[in-house]
Image (spheres, rainbow, N blue to C red):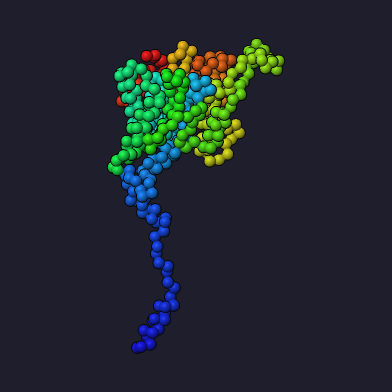
Amino acid sequence: RAAIPAALVVLVAAMPREAPVRSSEASRGARSRRLYDRGCLFSPDGRIYQVEYAQRAVDRGGAAFAAVTADQRYAVLGAVRSKPLRDASALRPRRDDGWRERVHRIDEHVACVSCGVVPDARQLLRALQRLANEHRRAWGVRAPVGLVAARLSDYVQAATLRAANRPFGAAFLIAGYDDDARAVRVYLTDPAGFYDEYEGVAAAGDAPKEARDGLLGWARRSEVVVDAPDDAASDAVAPDSGVVRDARDASGARRVVRDALRATLEKEQKRAPPSGGVRVRPVDVEIAIVEVRDDGTAVARVLSADAVAALLADDADDADAAAAGSPPASPSPTSSASSADDTSPAPSTHEESAGHEEGEAVTP
């Protein structure tokens, strides 16, 4: 009997022992995340996980782009629609020509593109349209585009101040004409309540690197382009006999946004694009334009399906002429896209209409 316990002691001593379980840095981080991600609470390392989740939703919510001309009198906003809306299916809800998912008009001189959760973005859009209407009624002038971006950021940031709240999972690219600066300005907001102004170009959401590089390359261009007169042969025109224009003009802005939208769709295919690139259909994208016309009035419009089709045409010169509603030889940015897109309707009444039709330009 005495030998049995001794043998057991020897066997137990010979068995391999597991290392004591210690809480690693990863496990502590996981427990902290589970504890502090149930609301807008600060974690011990100073993070608000719900805001980070909202930013993640924006990054996955589709790409958006903006390009402003060198004279700051013309801007193009473009976005890729969500994949369910692009796929042709009998189960897809019927949408009229005036329905837009991501590109909207806030006021007669301000347009925007949303990224992220679409219902959250539409609620913020209604708040922006109410702000524009109230500012016009109270002060008799249009709301400055910088004020629109600032008020939106205040509204979004207020949703992060209570533990029981969920932050808005949406961000906005806002472009509008500033009466004080006499220029078109572009702002980008985020779910945390931060906003900033961008010069030349801006990108948001799930924008691929190729599209961002194309925008930056266009924004850094400083050369001029010499257009040959219509009545002269292109090989017999002296450099000083043509029409000199900046490379960052209205046609260039439309072209660089179109190329960025195409690069985004090519990335989504996850395979090598066919020769000539992916064909972008009007149902795939939404585009808006903010411009200053020849008479000095600033107007923002969401392009109709016909105008989007003209802008996306393979022939760049024909597309520019069709979008501008003028002969291809006219390089004036203030006359572009003025007649082909006036059919886009104003926001519906349940979205707090901005008070004017898309094609109107009303000066205060």
Q: Percent x, y for residue 3?
A: 38, 87
Q: Residue at x 29, y 40 (%)?
A: 162
Q: Is residue 39 visible?
A: yes
Q: Quadrant of residue 362?
A: top left
Q: Residue at x 45, y 36 (%)?
A: 205
Residue in front for this viewpoint, 255 or 141: 141
Q: How many marks?
A: 0
Q: Percent x, y for residue 71?
A: 52, 20
Q: Percent x, y for residue 307?
A: 48, 21
Image quarter hosting the N terminus: bottom left
Left/right placement of residue 258 relative to residue 32 reads right
Q: Is residue 309 visible?
A: no
Residue in front for this viewpoint, 38 or 262: 38
Image quarter hosting the C terminus: top left
Farthest residue to the right: give it. 236
Q: Residue at x 42, y 27 (%)?
A: 174
Q: Residue at x 36, y 52 (%)?
A: 32
Residue in front for this viewpoint, 268 or 24: 24
Instruction: Reply above or below: 30 against 259.
Output: below
Left/right placement of residue 156 relative to residue 77 reads left
Q: Percent x, y for residue 155?
A: 33, 32
